Image (cartoon, helix red, strand yellow):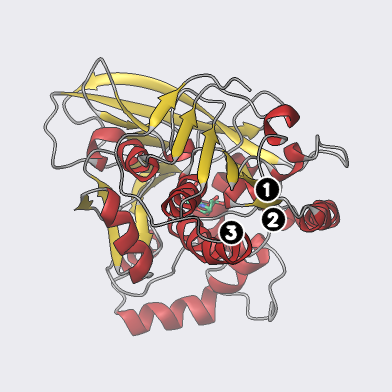
Amino acid sequence: MKFLTVGAGLSGAVLARGLAQAGHMVTVIDSRHHVAGNCHTERCTETGVLIHAYGPHIFHTDDAEVWAYANRFARFMPFSNRVKSTVDGAVYSLPINLHTINQFFGKTFSPSEARAFIETTQADRSLTNPQNFEEQALRFIGRDLYDAFFKGYTEKQWGCAPSALPAAILKRLPLRFNYDDSYFSHRFQGIPEQGYTAMVTSILNHVNIDVHLETAFTRAIEATVDHVIWSGPLDSYFGHRLGRLGYRTLDFERFVAQGDWQGCAVMNYGSRDVPFTRITEHKHFAPWEMHDATVCYREYARDCGPTDTPYYPIRLVAEKALLGQYQDLAAAEKNVSFVGRLGTYRYLDMDVTIRESLDLLPLLLARFGHVGAGQTARTTHIGNSLRI
Ligand code: UDP
């Protein structure tokens, strides 16, 4: 059978690999000049630093099978993200932990004292069933911490009132009553030593996979295959015929300096008065490398226009109906599988995209069969145009 994978990010690559190993022929196209989608990494020619070109990506998961899968295609180096936030002239540790609480309120609380303090003097316990981001924050951390660390940042990041956003966005971040300042709580955490693009290239490195970069999807290409794996924006497959789903895009203001510019990989800026959300200093994502110079990105979020790169599906509470209509259209497309953050319009992390692709694979194989013994990799063809 012939498959077309639209998008050479993690979701598409994992499915392409699984289908290829089952003997199917897979064409992978991507409109960009590189594989790996938004986790693309590249060497900065000026400083030699490995850049997370579309913003910071740290691999973190509790899923042992996904972790083992990723480690088949890359050597992972241990990495624990320790994010800081600058608010009103002070630097705090995130996610909110005992150090943040003690510093912010000028206290020396023990874990149980801090928990009691937040629950009895800060949290709004009248919000028994938080319906949105703001209510979730007020319920669990209260107004003061919310205003300092989340309100302004979230308005900048999402371009709307936090009360219009789903509570699930805030649930991504833990609240800790100890001094654990690791941004993620997962068992397995790391970054590929050679970056994500090398990892995805390795996943795609199979004799049955043809990769064509700088190649746009067309109905003519689609007509040449038996099944499409679509990892582009959900609404774009349907030509936005019901209207546009909202995405946020990012602009990066790059600057280079000598030495260590901010002392950590990610510094957030909670205040609305600072126009950017965070500064990423890329060399701190690869502490096993040595570089004299350093390169940083100031990150600005804005609404995604038709020609911009979509990063974040907004999922406004009020937009559920439109999303539901697109989901109905997608469910009726029997020859297309919609996958990944953009294809399913969900705020997914890398490990979940791999998990979902690994779970979809047996369903596709049950439908399309195994063609022959799986072959091991020789070299895949990576070109930049597809002729049909
Ligand atoms: N967030 C915030 N302040 C911060 C960090 C995060 O308000 O300093 C909120 C913001 O709405 C963000 C969400 O929490 O979109 C999830 O944060 P995460 O760090 O997971 O965002 P990502 O790294 O995926 O952009």
Some atom of ligand 1 lies within 8 Å of the CB belonging to the residue at label 3:
yes
Residue projecting furthest to the top: 46
- Is residue 2 shown above or below 107? above
Amino acid type of the residue that numbered disc 3 sits on in the rendered structure: Ile
Q: Which label belongs to residue 5?
A: none
Q: Position of residue 63 (x, y in %)?
A: 38, 69
The answer to which of 45 and 317 lies nearer the viewer is: 45
- Is residue 388 shown above or below 96? above
- Is residue 181 shown above or below 238? below
Mark 2 and mark 1 residues within 8 Å of each other at the beta carbon: yes
The answer to which of 213 and 209 lies nearer the viewer is: 209
Q: Quadrant of residue 222?
A: top right
Distance, label 2 to label 1, CA atoms, is 8 Å
Q: Position of residue 212 (x, y in %)?
A: 50, 27
Residue tagged 2: 165
Quadrant of image for the C terminus: top right
Distance, label 3 to label 2, CA atoms, is 8 Å
Mark 3 and mark 2 residues within 8 Å of each other at the beta carbon: yes
Q: Is residue 183 visible?
A: no
Q: Quadrant of residue 301?
A: top right
Some atom of ligand 1 lies within 8 Å of the CB belonging to the residue at label 2:
yes
Quick check: 209 left or right of 42?
A: right
